[in-house]
Image (cartoon, rainbow, N blue to C red):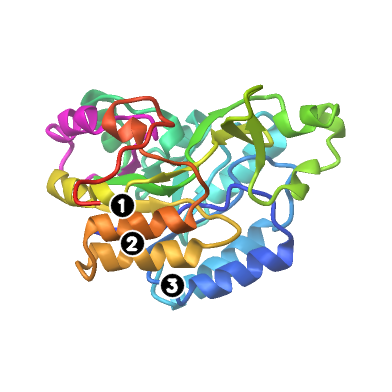
Amino acid sequence: MKLSLAPIPYLWPRDDVLAFYRAVADWPVDVVYLGETVCPKRRVLQGRDWLAIADRLADAGKEVVLSTLTLVEAESELISLRRMADNGRCMVEANDGSALALLAGKNGFVIGAHINVYNAHSLAVLARMGARRWVVPGELPAATLRQILAERPRGLETEVLVAGRVPLAFSARCFTARAHDRGKDECGIVCERYPDGLRLRTQEAQDFLTLNGVQIQSAGAANLAGALPEMRALGIDVVRVVPLIEGTEEVTRTLRAAIDDVVDAATAERALSAVLPAPACNGYWQGEAGMAWREAEGM
């Protein structure tokens, strides 16, 4: 089982992003996804910068994948997407239909979680287009995944988010800008104030969601370390970590120890709960409300 690092979903300063990926080169991750997936106005790094990072990570022995925007709304964004699809160096993670159209027939690509694959027939169609891996939608329960994997196309890898905030939805409207009474076109890149997103609470002061520009995330963070034995039995090939501004290295090292059977899954789950933002959640995997939490047996 391989360990992957998802693209940074938040807006971090350029120097912080560069320092983060310098450190990642020494982390026990096998696959690193790079790129801006949330908002094209976040131009902290350009295409050439991402490719330079990709080269350094590849030299460190990592598999590097370039990730596309989830909402492509302008011709300029489509032009950038074409350049990414034709980069000739790294595999690409497709996060919307326009990316699928550009990547079809090329030498392999990743189906991002936001393509919303919910059955084996859809997987088979995408595999024929050239997909080599699919990232399971965050809301898909283990029982449904088991049914899909029973008919999974041969050679198609499966990747599951196991740690970090769960991406839930995207919109053409910027939620963070609206929280500051600004329109999307006059946002002032206000999301740079929230390197781990803007927490949204109910009137009863209960953590509910996280606002991240045009993206909505879970309030807490997924912690599926306790389900690693089940994932291994299902034949999951890759488990994914979504970066946070603090604690991501410890999360990857804990998961690597669990994958390599240095620690048991219950111990890893407990360690992650101490690092990840509270409240931890694993409800979707259990077929329950996403924000629900159930400890692994033996905790």
> Which residue matches tag 3?
27
Whichever of labels 3 and 2 marks the residue nearer the N terminus, that label is: 3
Q: How far separated are the C-alphas under marks 3 and 1?
A: 18 Å
Left/right of residue 64 with respect to residue 154 in the rendered view: right
Is the residue marked by circle 1 packed among few (<14), some (14-19), or many (20+) residues within 10 Å?
many
Instruction: Report the number of numbered marks.
Output: 3
Label pair 3/1, CB-CB below 8 angstroms = no
Residue 82 vs residue 207, the one in the foreground: 207
- Amino acid type for the residue under numbered disc 1: Ala
Is the residue marked by circle 3 packed among few (<14), some (14-19), or many (20+) residues within 10 Å?
some
SS at circle 3: loop
Looking at the rendering, the stretch of residues picked out in magenta corresponds to 133-156
Find residue 81 and report its horizontal and vertical position in percent: 59, 43
- Amino acid type for the residue under numbered disc 2: Leu
Residue 22 vs residue 88, the one in the foreground: 22
Q: Can you tell which mark lies on residue 119?
A: none
Residue under the point 66% across and 22% down: 203
Q: How far separated are the C-alphas under marks 2 and 1?
A: 7 Å
Is the residue marked by circle 2 packed among few (<14), some (14-19), or many (20+) residues within 10 Å?
many
Left/right of residue 48 with respect to residue 238 in the rendered view: right
Label pair 2/1, CB-CB below 8 angstroms = yes
Camera-nearest label, 3 or 2? 2
Q: Is residue 280 magenta?
A: no
Quarter-of-image position of residue 130: top left
Q: Image quadrant for the N terminus? A: bottom left
Label pair 3/2, CB-CB below 8 angstroms = no
- Amino acid type for the residue under numbered disc 3: Trp
> Which residue matches tag 1?
225
> Which residue matches tag 2?
255
SS at circle 2: helix
Q: How far separated are the C-alphas under marks 3 and 2?
A: 11 Å
